[in-house]
Amino acid sequence: MENPYLPYPVRIDDIIVESEDRSLKTFKFVFLNPEDEKKFAYSAGQFAELSIAGKGEIPIGIASSPVEKGFIKFTVNKAGLVTSHLHNMTVGDIMGVRGPLGNSYPWKQLEGKNVLIVGGGFAFTTLRSSIIYMLDPANRSKFGDITVVYGARSPGMLLYKDELVEWEKRDDINMHITVDGTDDPDWKYNVGFVPPITEQKAPQGDADSYAIVCGPPIMIKFTQPVLEKLGYDHDHIILSLENRMKCGIGMCGRCGIGRELVCKDGPVFTLNQINQTPREY
Amino acid sequence: MKVIKIDKAQWTKGLDALREGYRLYGPVKEKEIACFRELADGQTPDSEIKNTRLSPKSLVFPQSEAMMAYSLDKNDDEQGICKEVPKDYSPRAVLGIRPCDAKAMVLVRMNFDNGDYRDPYWLNLYEATTFVGMACDNPCSTCFCTTAGCGPYHEEGLDLLLSDQGDHYLAKVLSDKGQALAQKAGWTTEADGQPMESGKATAEGKITAAVETDRLRALDTLALHGADFWEDISFSCINCGTCTFVCPTCWCFDIQDEVYGKKGVRMRNWDSCMFPIFTVHTTGHNPRDTKLQRLRQRFMHKLKYFVDKYDKGIMCVGCGRCVQQCPVNIDIRKVSHAMNSLDAENFCAVQGK
C-alpha cells in the first residue's frame, strides 16, 4: 500500500529573496529520485506539504508551473516554526515534499474562456503557476483574454518582479500591477488597493469569463462586490482557501468547512460552493 | 448463516489454540477501569464488562503512533529523509468487542479509505484484525444503538458474533475470517441459531433511549449551523475533549515531530475538535475560536456533515460513552432532538444572515 504520508526527498537547489523585508523567499527544489518527479505530476492551483524532519510540515501552494520541468518552486512567508526554520536553511540542504495535494483551478472548464486573475500580497504563488501555464505556447490559444490585477503593499513587496516586467511587455496578457502606496517617483504602474483597481481595469464578466481570486481575506471581501458589479456570477468566481492542515489528504479532520475539506475537496472552490458552507476558514 | 455452539468448558482451550496464530485482545479490568488490552497467556476476556471506558478504537488507531523515523545526524547520508518504521501487522483477534464498537470501525473506515487515499497505518491494523463480537443482552441505560443504525446484535464489522447462552456461547459466523478463527480455535459444532434470533429481539426491546435523526438529511446545513440552540447547548461545555476521546467514531488526529538527540520520529496522536489549537492558523486567526463553534462542529459533523457526505446515517453508533462521561451532562440524544426538530420556518431567516 502506497504511504501518502511519506514525503519525497528533495534538495534545495536555489533560494531567492522575493521581498524587501526578507519575509518572503522562493525555494526551488530538485527531487533526489528522478522517478519521484514523475509521481509529482500537478496542475496549477494545487499545493504540497513541505516537510522538515524534526520540525513538521506546512501546506504551501505550488508556485512553479506544470510546464516548468526539472524542479518545483514554493514561495514561503516566514511565520511559524517550520517556515522560520526553512528560511534559515541553505542551498544543498535535504528536506521533503509531499504531494501534489488538493484540487486545482478548473482548467478544463476554463478552456475557451476569458480569465481574470486577481491577486494580493503573497497569495500570488499559484496564480503565477497559472499564468505561466496559460502563457505557455502550447496552451495560450486555449484561452481567451487574460487579465491580471496584482497588488502588494509596496513595490518591494511584489513577488516575481522580473516576470511581472516581462508580462507587462507582452500583448497577449493585460497586466495591472498596483501597490497600496509608494514614495518612488519612478513608479510607473498603479497606486491603489486591489478592489478599486479591479473595478477600473477589469473587463466585464459574462458567460465566457471567469475570475480567479487569491489574497488576504480583507481583499477578497471587498473584491467580491466589485466582481458582482462587473457581472461575474458566483459560479464564475473561483477562490482558493486556506485552513490549518496536517494530513493534507482528507483524514485528520481539522480543515473542514462543513462537509467539505479544504485539503481534499479544495483548496479551490467557486464562490457559489463556499456560499453553501458555514465558511469556517 | 452458520451458527456454532461453544461450550464454556471449551472456551479457554479454544483461546489457547488461537494464541498460536493470533495476538489476542479483549475487555479486561485494569485498576477497576474497563479497557481493551492484549490478553496475557491464560487471561480471558471479562464477559461482565458492558462498555469499556474508552472505546476499542485504539486497537486499530493507537492514541500515539510513530509514522516514520529519520536521522538528524549531519554525517548520515540519509539525514533529514523520512523512512517508514517497522510495524507488526501479524494476525490479531479482538474477543468480546461490542457490536456498536465494531460498527464504529466500519464508519471510521470511510475516512481512512476515502477513495483518493488509503491510510496504511489504520487499514493495515484493521485488515490484520479478526473481530469477535459479544452480543449485548443487558445493555446500559445510556445505550441508544437501535436508533443509531446499530443494535445489540448488530453484525456489521464483525467476523463472528457470540451470544451468551449460560453454559455455552452461540457463535454466528459472518465472514471467512471468522470461519478461519473458529476453525483454528476448534469450535466446529454446528447448532440451531434460533436462540440468537429471540435473544436479539429481547435485547433490542431493552433499549429505550433514542436519538432522533429522520429529518437531519433534509434540513438545511446553514439553518442548522445558525440555529440559536447552540448557545444553550454549549453554555456548560468546558471543552475538555472527553467526548471525542471516548467516542468510537471520532478519528481526528494531529501529526507532530519528536526529536531525541540526533534521531526523530513523526508521530500521529489523537486530537480533538474541542481544542482551540486544532484549527488555529499561524497568524492567530481561528475559524473556530469559541467553544460554541467547536461544540457545534462536533455535533454538526456527526449528525449532519457526515450524513450528507456519505448517506450512510449518522457518525454515531449509540454506545452512550459521551453521555456517561461528559462532566457537564451534555447529551447527544438531546442535541439530536434539537437539531432534528429545527423549525422549518427558521430556514429563511437564518440563511439570510
Image (cartoon, helix red, strand yellow):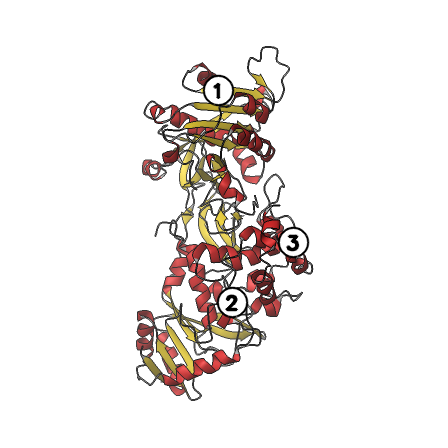
| Label 2 close to label 1 by CB (< 8 Å) | no
Query: Helix, strand or loop at disc 2?
Result: loop
Q: Amino acid at mark 1?
A: Met
Query: Helix, strand or loop at disc 1?
Result: strand
- Name which quarter of the figure residue A155 lies in: top right
Mark 2, residue position: B55
Tell whether B209 sits left or right of A170. right
Q: Position of residue B309 (x, y in %)?
A: 45, 54
Query: Helix, strand or loop at disc 3?
Result: helix
Quadrant showing the C terminus of chain B? top right
Q: Amino acid at mark 3?
A: Lys
Chain bearing mark 3: B
| Mark 2 and mark 1: Cα distance apart in space | 58 Å
* Residue at 42% in and 37% down: A104
- Name which quarter of the figure residue A134 lies in: top left
Q: Are marks 3 and 2 on the same chain?
A: yes
Mark 1, residue position: A175
Tell whether A146 sits left or right of A55. left
| Mark 3 and mark 1: Cα distance apart in space | 45 Å
Tell whether B236 sits left or right of B53. right
Q: Are marks 2 and 1 on the same chain?
A: no
> As rendered, which of A94 and B351 lies closer to the eye?
B351
Mark 3, residue position: B291
Chain bearing mark 2: B
| Mark 3 and mark 2: Cα distance apart in space | 24 Å
Q: Which is more N-terminal, label 2 or label 3?
A: 2
What is the crowding at mark 2: few (fewer than 14 residues within 10 Å), some, or many (at least 20)?
Answer: many
The answer to whether residue A159 of the structure is visible from this angle is no
Q: How many marks?
A: 3
Q: Position of residue B232 (x, y in %)?
A: 68, 59
